[in-house]
Amino acid sequence: MSTDQQWDIVTGVGLTALAVAAGRAAESERPDALINDPYASRLVAAARPSAPVSFSDGKLLADGTDDELWSGTSDYVGLRSRVFDDYFLRASADGIRQVVILASGLDTRAYRLPWPSGTVCFELDQPAVLGFKSATLDEEGAAPGCDHRPVPVDLRDDWGAALETRGFDRSRPTAWLAEGLLPYLPPEAEVRLFEEVSRLSAADSRFALERIDNMHHLLNDPLVRERADSVGFDLLALLPGGEREPVEKQLTRLGWQFEDHPVAESAAAFQRPQTGPSMFREHVTHTIARRA
């Protein structure tokens, strides 16, 4: 495993997973909630973040302040979570019983979604992140609703071999998810990830991705910079440089058929206007791909 740029839940990329969990907790408190994550608030509390976080009427509060960025973030996280929840439910309805969540962070879908009998869910992430989540959920008495198999591995390393060691069956169709992952991978690691997913995907496999165009521009949004600076967190330092091949070209080259769904489209479908900065509406696309 790589020895550089590793993280736990309160450092580096782990902090972004904590923010996403806080967004799910806030969404779950709304009267019109798009998801119900009964574990998210406990995960946030157990992490003991440096900036106080609480929840009120479905809005995410940091330092006791309800601001535009936090509210907009929780709005987007709730919508994104529902989009990918539905993706997994559709895959399950189509008979897929093998699921892989890449860089799962504090994702709790293995515990909160109604998985059909026989479903195996693999979660890949840094050992410290998976260990923290497992220990916290065990303390809560939470039990997964599927055959849940954590895979502690760095996605910049040979994660495919680690996945197969845990019992992944490449002959079975798989529903893959890369949510909040791609911007944090170096370009060469992103290429390897797409190639490895493709190598391991049987016919009729699915691949859902969150695509963020021009992430550096997004993180330079004044509201984003102000909030990051207020907690001493340099978001831009997490992003590797280098030119990237467009995701759509990679998917096409590797034999995937796909549909793009802009955030505005999903927001309209769920009657959930996106508040706060326009960054999510303008820069983020949800892509659903299928292997013929």
Image: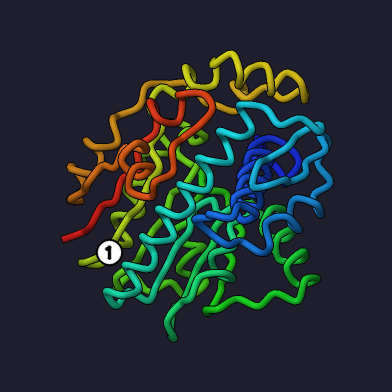
| Residue 3 at least partly seen | no
Say which quarter of the image contains residue 248: top left
Q: Position of residue 257 (x, y in %)?
A: 17, 50
Q: Is residue 109 left or right of residue 53?
A: left
Label 1: element kind: loop
Quarter of the figure with the C terminus: bottom left
- Residue in front for this viewpoint, 246 or 186: 246
Residue type at mark 1 is Ser
Say which quarter of the image contains residue 60: top right
Q: Which residue is mark 1?
A: 205
Say which quarter of the image contains residue 188: top left
- Residue in front for this viewpoint, 182 or 47: 47
Furthest-bottom residue in this view: 117
- Residue in front for this viewpoint, 83 or 57: 57
| Residue 134 at least partly seen | yes
Looking at the image, is 39 positioned above or below residue 116?
above
Q: Is residue 230 left or right of residue 36?
A: right
**Residue drawn at the location 72% of the way across and 53% of the way down:** 128
Q: Residues within 10 Å of mark 1 (few under 14, many from 20)?
A: many
**Residue drawn at the location 45% of the way across and 68% of the way down:** 164
Q: Position of residue 101 (x, y in %)?
A: 48, 58
Looking at the image, is 231 positioned above or below residue 158?
above
Furthest-front residue in this view: 31
**Residue drawn at the location 66% of the way across and 52% of the way down:** 25
Q: Is residue 284 left or right of residue 171?
A: right
Looking at the image, is 204 positioned above or below residue 226?
below
Q: Position of residue 283 (x, y in %)?
A: 39, 27
Q: Position of residue 162 (x, y in %)?
A: 51, 62
Colouring convention used in this rendered image of the protein: rainbow
